[in-house]
Amino acid sequence: MGTQNTQDSNEQAHAGGTGRRALLGAAVLGAGGVLGLSGTAAAAAEARHGGDGLRSLPVPTVIGHRGASGYRPEHTFGSYQLALDLGADIIEAGDLVPTRDGHLVCRHEPEIGGTTDVAAHPEFAGRRTTKVLDGVPTTGWFTEDFTLAELKRLRAVERIPANRPHNTLYDGRWGIPTFEEVLKWQDEQTRKRGKQVWIYPETKHPTYFRKLGLGLEERVAKLLHKHGKDRKNSPVVLQSFEPTGIQRLNKLVDNPLVVLLSTAGSRPWDFVETGDPRTVADLITRAGLREIAGYAQGIGPTLDLVIPKDAAGNLTRPTTLVRDAHAVGLVLHPYTMRNENPFLPADFRKGSDADAYGDSFGAFRTYFATGIDGVFTDNPDTGVLARADFVNG
């Protein structure tokens, strides 16, 4: 997730300390998210999660962002596997983009120059090109110009080596997974671990691909149906930055659905294409949230929509987004918590090294105190420990 703007990199928050302990209860003790909750807290949690499978997840939910991408090259089985080992409740296994022959693969973006070794393959040098992706000229290699067989010749590499030099140790170890491989892996891991493994794929740039004749939603729905994972309680949550893409999915599958929200002044690209003048700021009004609640179960806002930053990059006061979204029954899973200094609010940084860790525990605590239902994080182990700290006071 998270290329709708550069917001993907910088988000965190500020509030108090004991806000949700009653609601959290025994959530971190195991698989039953609302187990151990009592009275009105349990009722509120159940009502908020609608009766779909989301209610079985611990709250706040720790979501492994592209796996455990703080430690391994993102969107690889190495990253997904490690995220499970580190305690993530759900894995963002799949930013879904299509190949030329219509298969869905897991890459952060259709442009793969920064996440694979494609530049080292002389046979693909002629595929390098410039395209306009959601209004932005982008140069590189694109999945839609490769067959699946060709992509399978590539190996994954670390996307931000300047911040994560240690992850480059694993460059070339894993290839590019398909969505169908992820669905099979999910079943395999569920059997091995004796507990349901959840995944949280995102459809990337749906309007862009639909115009190329490579519609994502139908392909996602077909695979989910094939594997019996297209139901209300199926352990697959679907997300997208394009509301119309989520509305399309709502007609094709019964899975929990989440609308991703970038910066307040931005417009979803499907809105740009159709001339809808609304911005994200319009979508997070009470009226906008009520509309989203008509076809989705949650929102995935940038953390800056939960707690804005000032000009110096320090956190300010929380907005009313959590309260307003909960009032219409929506779950909030903001993005993205990362341990390294450049990605933390200024008031949680330590030193100035780009790959040094700041006070991410303090940032997690601050965001959890706003009442969010979960958070995407590149460091699931940090998130799990931070949740335990928050619950236990």
Image: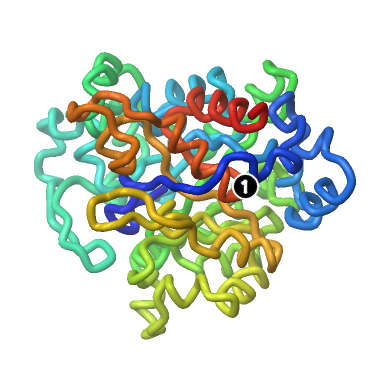
Q: Is residue 344 visible?
A: yes
x and y, in percent, of residue 373 in the image: 62, 47
Q: What element carries label 1?
A: loop
Quadrant in the rendering for residue 347:
top left
Q: Nearer the viewer, residue 120 or 165?
A: 165
- Looking at the picture, the colour scheme in use is rainbow
Name the residue located 37 percent from the left edge and 47 percent from the top edge.
Answer: 11
Q: Position of residue 139 (x, y in %)?
A: 14, 52
Q: Which residue is drawn at 13% across and 28% down?
A: 120
Amino acid of disc 1: Asp
**Residue positioned 71% across, 30% down in the render:** 196
Residue 86 pos. (x, y %):
53, 20
Q: Residues within 10 Å of mark 1 (few under 14, many from 20)?
A: many
Please give the residue where the numbered disc 1 appears in the rendered image: 373
- The percent position of residue 216, horizontal first and vertical second, equals 47, 58
Left or right of 354, for residue 367: right
As displayed, is residue 315 above or below residue 74? below
